Amino acid sequence: MSGVFYGIGVGPGDPELITLKAVRIMAGAPVIAYSATEEGESMVRAIAAPHLPDGRIEIAVRTPIGRGPAAAEAVYDGYAAEIARHLDAGRDVAFLCQGDPFVYGSFAYLHERLAARHTTRVVPGVSSLGAVAAAAGVPLVRGCEVLSVVPAPLAEAELETRLGAGDAVAVVKVGRHLAKVRRVIQRLGLMGRAVYVERATMENQRVLALARVRRASAPYFSMIVVPGNGSRSE
Ligand SMILES: C[S@@+](CC[C@H](N)C(=O)[O-])C[C@H]1O[C@@H](n2cnc3c(N)ncnc32)[C@H](O)[C@@H]1O
């Protein structure tokens, strides 16, 4: 019998925010896969570490950064083939994802290669959207407010259109785009409500009003939220 391919959300950073279901499946899967940097570190493995039993086969999925889509496609093809060999041999594979697997997760690239031929199940995780709102200490959306989730790498003009369209916004993948996002938020008159959150729920979490952030770029795990102002009741 074939193994099952699991996408497991391990939450935003605090190992206590991993679900009971994720822990149970990780404990039973003989093969554990996770994204890692090209040099070796894996934040997602570090989050799950307190719950990972010894003696598992581990696959660190290392994808090239900045070498174009063709290089990344070839790398994902290779990892999909490696995972498929385990599944065909009857071994379950648990692919660990930071936050939730289907919210900007690299799991999607393996899912699209494997789901047609292999039984695939997704265990949702606590996404960074909720974690960042909790860290900021403000409700993100209330009543009939519309939340826009916007990736910071978008061109400045599109960013402005998207940020202007929602009642509340969450800007993800801020990184080296911090200055651009600040400019757009300033132009839209949203600076007063904008909150910058670094590494929500991790030990070195930081929360600041965006207006007080002086740095030019942000770490990978950072987000800017502009919560709704509560003006759209049901
Ligand atoms: C590739 S996406 C992965 C999102 C993840 N699957 C989720 O459900 O939260 C990575 C982006 O999510 C945001 N992010 C993820 N975890 C975060 C955290 N703990 N604190 C702040 N932002 C976070 C950052 O904007 C980061 O650049």
Image (cartoon, grey):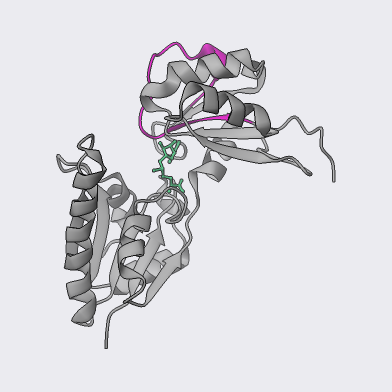
**Residue 171 in picture, x, y percent from top left:** 52, 32
Q: Position of residue 217 (x, y in %)?
A: 37, 19
Q: Residue at x 84, y 41 (%)?
A: 233
Foreground residue among 138 and 65 = 65
Q: Quadrant of ligand 1?
A: top left
Q: Residue at x 41, y 23 (%)?
A: 177
- Left or right? Give the position of 90 relative to 50: left
185 versus 14 height, above or below: above
Query: In x, y percent, where is residue 162?
Result: 59, 31
- Quadrant assignment for the N terminus: bottom left
Which quarter of the picture shows residue 141? Answer: top right
Q: Is residue 56 visible?
A: no
Magenta highlight on residue 134: no
Based on the picture, tell me whether residue 224 belongs to the magenta stretch: yes
Residue in the image at 29% along x and 44% along y? 43
Rendered position, 171 above or below 212: below
Residue that extends furthest to the right in the rendered view of this protein: 234
Part of the protein shown in magenta: 207-226
Tell me if I can see residue 166 in this picture.
yes
Residue 26, above or below 229: below
- Counting the numbered discs, the total is 0
Tell me: 146 left or right of 118. Answer: right
| Residue 216: image location, x then y, percent | 39, 14
